[in-house]
Image: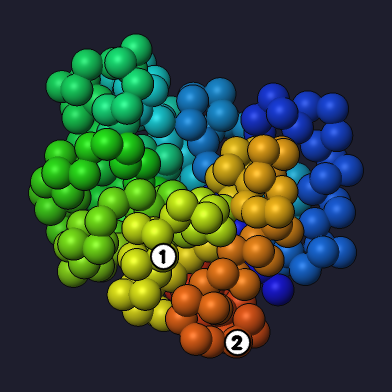
């Protein structure tokens, strides 16, 4: 059984066969998906998908790549979208210093803080995007102690993970943990307590081995769970059960 804590089925990569893929997930043991908005259109589409499919939930937010559009008008639309009962989080939001063409850092930080304020106001968890911005991300998370969430596609050090855990955050593991050169993330998985582990695809991106390079989909999480079970010395069933419990706890989904 699988609950994908971060997916993008609104992505253009699924335009040809979206319905077929989504409908097929249940037969492959997928009981839940959190579809996360990145652009404003992606946030709108995520809500539509969660309204269309009973096992899909949505997060609404603006990815740092699009931070330049975030203003009070956009925040108001996100606020309105979040009134839908299937919207369970604000995200994905955060900082991305990897790509030079992304908006300037001060604009990214301002957009991040506005959306953290919204999460605090609405009492919703957040889905954090952090790429090459660990210190600034942590500093902003500390400004909002009332807000918790998940650091999605975790890419930081053990020390950074420990700081996030202290703030009440969950750690999201993607297919990267199955890659041969993923020693750092395996070390993180060793120290993250069982009650703070989440599994995710970030589909259509980052498919795990043995599907690396292909379009990702939620049932491929089985390979992530296998790897985490090996690292933690737990059974596959234990990892499945705890990761489902964890995401339901974070999103306040009725058991």
Viewer-nearest residue: 104 or 80: 104
Which numbered disc, 2 or 1, marks the residue that appears first in the sequence? 1
Residue at image position (46%, 81%) is 232
Front residue of 30/130: it is 130
Camera sees residue 147: no
Q: Give the answer, above or below, for where 109 lies relative to 214.
A: above
The residue that appears at 53% across and 62% down in the rendered structure is 199
User: Quadrant of residue 30 in the image?
Assistant: bottom right
Residue 202 seen from this side: yes
> Does 245 sit left or right of 10 as displayed?
left
- Dividing the picture into quadrants, the one containing residue 165 is bottom left
Q: Residue at x 47, y 76 (%)?
A: 231
Q: Position of residue 143 (x, y in %)?
A: 11, 49
Dot 2: few (<14), some (14–19), or many (≥20) neighbours within 10 Å? some
Q: Quadrant of the C terminus?
A: bottom right
Instruction: Say whether marks 2 and 1 touch (CB < 8 Å).
Output: no
Q: Is residue 66 left or right of residue 219?
A: left
Looking at the figure, which quarter contains the N terminus? bottom right
* In the rendered image, the vertical position of residue 219 relative to residue 1, given as above or below: above
- Which label is found at residue 186? 1
- What residue would you read off at disc 2? 235
Q: Position of residue 236 (x, y in %)?
A: 63, 81
Q: Which image quarter: residue 25?
A: bottom right
């Amino acid at each position: 059984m699988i609950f994908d804590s971060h997916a993008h089925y609104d992505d253009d990569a699924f335009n040809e066969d979206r319905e077929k893929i989504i409908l097929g997930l249940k037969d492959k043991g997928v009981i839940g998906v959190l579809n996360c908005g990145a652009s404003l259109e992606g946030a709108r589409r995520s809500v539509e998908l969660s309204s269309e499919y009973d096992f899909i939930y949505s997060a609404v937010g603006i990815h740092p790549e699009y931070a330049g559009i975030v203003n009070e008008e956009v925040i108001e639309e996100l606020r309105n979208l979040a009134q839908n009962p299937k919207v369970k989080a604000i995200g994905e939001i955060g900082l991305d210093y990897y790509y030079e063409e992304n908006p300037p850092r001060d604009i990214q930080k301002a957009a991040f803080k506005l959306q953290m304020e919204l999460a605090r106001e609405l009492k919703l968890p957040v889905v954090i995007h952090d790429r090459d911005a660990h210190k600034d991300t942590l500093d902003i998370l500390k400004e909002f102690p009332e807000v918790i969430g998940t650091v999605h596609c975790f890419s930081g050090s053990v020390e950074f993970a420990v700081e996030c855990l202290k703030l009440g955050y969950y750690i999201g593991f993607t297919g990267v943990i199955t890659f041969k050169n993923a020693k750092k993330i395996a070390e993180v998985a060793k120290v993250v307590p069982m009650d703070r582990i989440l599994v995710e695809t970030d589909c259509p991106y980052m498919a795990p081995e043995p599907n690396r390079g292909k379009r990702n989909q939620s049932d491929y999480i089985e390979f992530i769970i296998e790897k985490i079970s090996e690292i933690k010395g737990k059974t596959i069933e234990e990892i499945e059960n705890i990761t489902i419990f964890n995401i339901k706890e974070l999103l306040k989904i009725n058991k």
